[in-house]
Image (cartoon, rainbow, N blue to C red):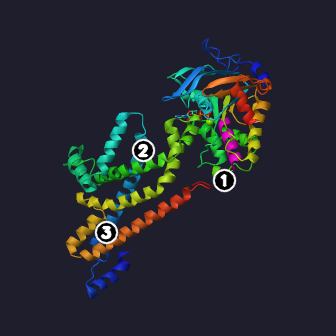
Amino acid sequence: MTAETTQPASNLAADTPATAWTPDQPMVSLKNVHKAFGELEVLKGVSLDVMKGEVICIIGPSGSGKSTLIRCINALNDIQQGSITVEGIEVNDPKLDKLELRKKVGMVFQQYNLFPHKTALENVMMAPLHVLKESKAEVEKRAVGLIKKVRLEGREHHYPGELSGGQQQRVAIARSLAMTPDVMLFDEVTAALDPETVKEVLVTIQELAEDGMTCILVTHEMGFARELADHIYFTDRGIIVEHGPPATFFTDAKDPRTKEFLSQIL
Amino acid sequence: MLEVIAPFFQNLYEKTGINFIIFYDQYEYDRFIHAIWVSFQLIIACLIFSTIVGIIGAWAQGARSKLLRLTMAGYIQLFRNTPPLVQILFFYFVLGNFTPTYDAGGFQQAYIGAFGWAVVSLSFFAGAFNVEIFRAGIEAVPTATREAAESLGYSRLKAYIYIILPLAFRVCLPSLNNNLVNLLKTTTLAYAIAVPEMMYTANQVWSDNVNVPEMMFVLFVYYIGLVGVLVWMMNRWERKMKIPGYG
Ligand SMILES: Nc1ncnc2c1ncn2[C@@H]1O[C@H](COP(=O)(O)OP(=O)(O)O)[C@@H](O)[C@H]1O
Ligand SMILES: [Mg+2]
């Protein structure tokens, strides 16, 4: 995964100003992010950096602000204070070009949120056709490839209602990838699945990570996090309590809250 | 056509006095056929335009502009809470006075005639109900689906066209169905401004021939038939739009 970071930045335009993002800087960077829903403070100064090709996992008790955190990264939620950048784009800028941001950031939700009136293949093809206005032949080729990648050959023409949860979630991943994002956000994507189908989705994400995709995952699958993550963040009540690489995080947790959470979940 | 049925109805009239003159007299027959044609045009135009008003109105109701939202709310209140007959008369006699005219060989002809005003007023009348119907359908689309569209880069308009409206349509088809049936029946009010549709023509025929019960019978059969066809088509459409494994 780290090999990715050394690749030349050939796709960066030479005439962009000095602030232009380069791959030696964090791809996603949160600095002192504060977010409140009315009176309720949900994020109270969160900072974290994600380098290109890194996989980070966010864990923490329910209600600690994990979903809010990851939704802020693609501007589904706005923030009150602090800064979030994705490849140098300031997400909190009132003049933000949301389309530019969303071309870079893919998101997969807990409840899949597929478009129920479209088949699996159509779900994957829609956004590139409607949003990027790419040619149908090109999009179809890519979509068929992605369906194959998530191991759903033969299900292309099934509607979401005809697929299992795990299959739907893999379509949702393919749908996100069809927009060729640079970073993927996963918000508890296996939490709604039957135990048997959790694995097939995790395998898909693992392959994605091994291909060098930058991933930010909220998850309760500790085994998965330990194996795959470059870095683990533990959140509680709107702050990052503790973080570190999995090798030390799971064994040397210092904060009592982390210890308690890990003892409950492991 | 007339040659085939005329002897029977002529005979019926002579034997029993039951006078379906539109089925044996060439002049009345032509009037009747013309009425069918006009009422078809009127109904189809109103069905289409009122649906368009509903779709655009439901979009405008969710707009960021407060002025636009207030305008929509005012429009809906006005058209839902006043009699459609009053609306037609208002459009034709009040707004009709201000329509631009053109020189039609010696006299001034208005660009929008009685037929046009009937279409406009009836479309806005039924459209006001359609806006509410579509809004209910749109509200039934989960926020999560909108967010999925949003995070794929869909703008509000594109999400509305490609995702929200198609899903909302399926939810609101039964109520839309109802409202369009009502609209079909309400088109008879166009007789008040002398649009030569079926109601108006029937009225003329019975005034000329004193056969009110017979023409009433024709009216009933005609509208039962039309409503039947509309309902059949809407039901077919509803079935066709059904998504496997959904709802
Ligand atoms: N749209 C919202 N409006 C108001 N409160 C919200 C909203 N979204 C989340 N919250 C609140 O913010 C807190 C954090 O929620 P969330 O980020 O979903 O936590 P997690 O994903 O860690 O379970 C919760 O108390 C939740 O009730
Ligand atoms: Mg959550």
Q: Look at mark 1 in the image and give the residue it sits on.
A: A162
Q: Is residue B229 above or below residue A53?
A: below
Q: Quadrant of ligand 2?
A: top right
Whether residue B103 is visible: no
Residue at disc 3, secondary structure: helix
| Amino acid tagged 1 | Glu
Type of secondary structure dominating the magenta stretch: helix
Density class for disc 3 (Cα within 10 Å; few <14, some 14-19, many ≥20) is: many
Kindly report the distance in space between the C-alpha atoms of the residues bearing marks 3 and 2: 38 Å
- Disc number at residue B58? 2
Q: Look at mark 3 in the image and give the residue it sits on.
A: B32
Residue at far left of view: B106
The quarter of the image holding the N terminus of chain B is bottom left
Density class for disc 2 (Cα within 10 Å; few <14, some 14-19, many ≥20) is: many
Q: Quadrant of residue A82?
A: top right
Kindly report the distance in space between the C-alpha atoms of the residues bearing marks 3 and 1: 52 Å
Q: Nearer the viewer, residue B86 or A258?
A: A258
Of the residues under marks 3 and 2, which one precedes in the sequence? 3
| Amino acid tagged 3 | Phe
Q: Would residue B27 be found to the left or right of residue B5 on screen?
A: left
Residue at far top of view: A18
| Amino acid tagged 2 | Ala
